[in-house]
Amino acid sequence: MAEIFSFLRNTYWVLRHGKSVPNERGLIVSSLENGTLPEYGLASEGVEQARSAGELFSKELKDGNILLENVRICYSPFSRTTQTAEVVANVLGIPFQSSQCKVMVELRERFFGPSFELLSHDKYPEIWALDAKDPFMPPEGGESVSHVVSRLSKALENIETECQGCAILVVSHGDPLQILQAILHAAKLDHTSQVDGVSSIIEAVKVPPVLSQHRKFALQTAELRQIK
C-alpha cells in the first residue's frame, strides 16, 4: 500500500457519522455523557447513509487492492459514531467485536461547553467565529480547537504505534474530523526531516493560521474522505 504521508505508517480515511437524531432535532449533543445515550444515536436515514458509506469504502479498498485483514476501524464512543462504525463493519464483513474495530475516547465529539449543550444548532456559528478569532480560546467550559488537536494527536500516535501498512478508517464527528484534516494537511506541507514523531510534527503546525481554518475541511453526514 503506497504511503501518501511520509511520516505516517498507515493510510487514513475519515468518515463523519451518519445523520443522527440530534441532527434531525437540530440539537448540539457534545458531552460524553449525553453523546453515549442510545436516544442520541443514528436516525433511520443515517443508518442508510452509513451503509452507503460502507459500500463506497469497500469499493475504494478493492480499487486499491487492500485486503480486509489490513483494515482497521477506529471510532468515537458516541452512539451515533459507534452505530456508523458497526454498519460499515457489517458491510465490509468485519466482525465488529474484534481487534479490527477499536473505540477510542480521543475521537469523541468536541465538547462545546454547558452554555451550548442541548441547545440549537444555530449556535454553531458563534463557536466557529471564536475559533477563527482565536483557536486557543475555548467556549466557556468547553474545548478549544487546540484542546482537540492534543487528543487527536494522542489517538494518531496510538494508531501509528499499533498498526503498520493498514487502511485506517476514523469514524468521528464534524469538528474533530475538520481539525484532524487541517493539521495533517499543514503537516504534509510543512514537514521537514528535522522533526520526528507524529506528535512532534503536529505540534510544529499547531499554530493559529492552521487551526483557525479548520472549517475549510467540513464534511457532510456520512461523508467518506481519504486523507491525502
Image: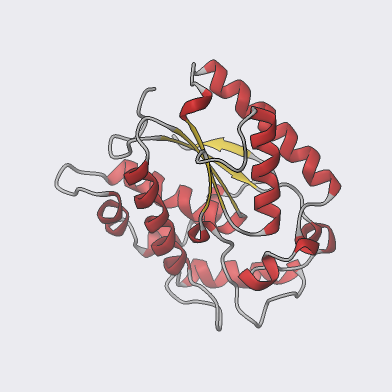
- In the depicted structure, whether residue 178 falls above or below residue 139: above
Horizontally, residue 199 falls left or right of residue 211, namely: left
- In the depicted structure, whether residue 60 falls above or below residue 194: above
Expressed as whole percent of the image width and height from the top left, the position of residue 207 reads: 34, 62
Residue 226 visible somewhere in the drawing: yes
- In the depicted structure, whether residue 211 falls above or below residue 15: below
The image quadrant where one finds the C terminus is top left
The image quadrant where one finds the N terminus is top left
Q: What residue is drawn where x is 61% and y is 54%?
A: 174
Horizontally, residue 151 falls left or right of residue 92, namely: left
Report the colour scheme: secondary structure
Comparing 181 with 171, the one in front is 171
Expressed as whole percent of the image width and height from the top left, the position of residue 112 reads: 60, 73
Expressed as whole percent of the image width and height from the top left, the position of residue 24 reads: 83, 57
Q: What residue is drawn where x is 33% and y is 41%?
A: 188
Comparing 38 with 128, the one in front is 38
Expressed as whole percent of the image width and height from the top left, the position of residue 27 reads: 77, 67
Rendering quarter of residue 215 = bottom right
Residue 31 visible somewhere in the drawing: no
Q: What residue is drawn where x is 54% and y is 48%?
A: 217
Q: How many marks?
A: 0
Horizontally, residue 60 falls left or right of residue 191, namely: right
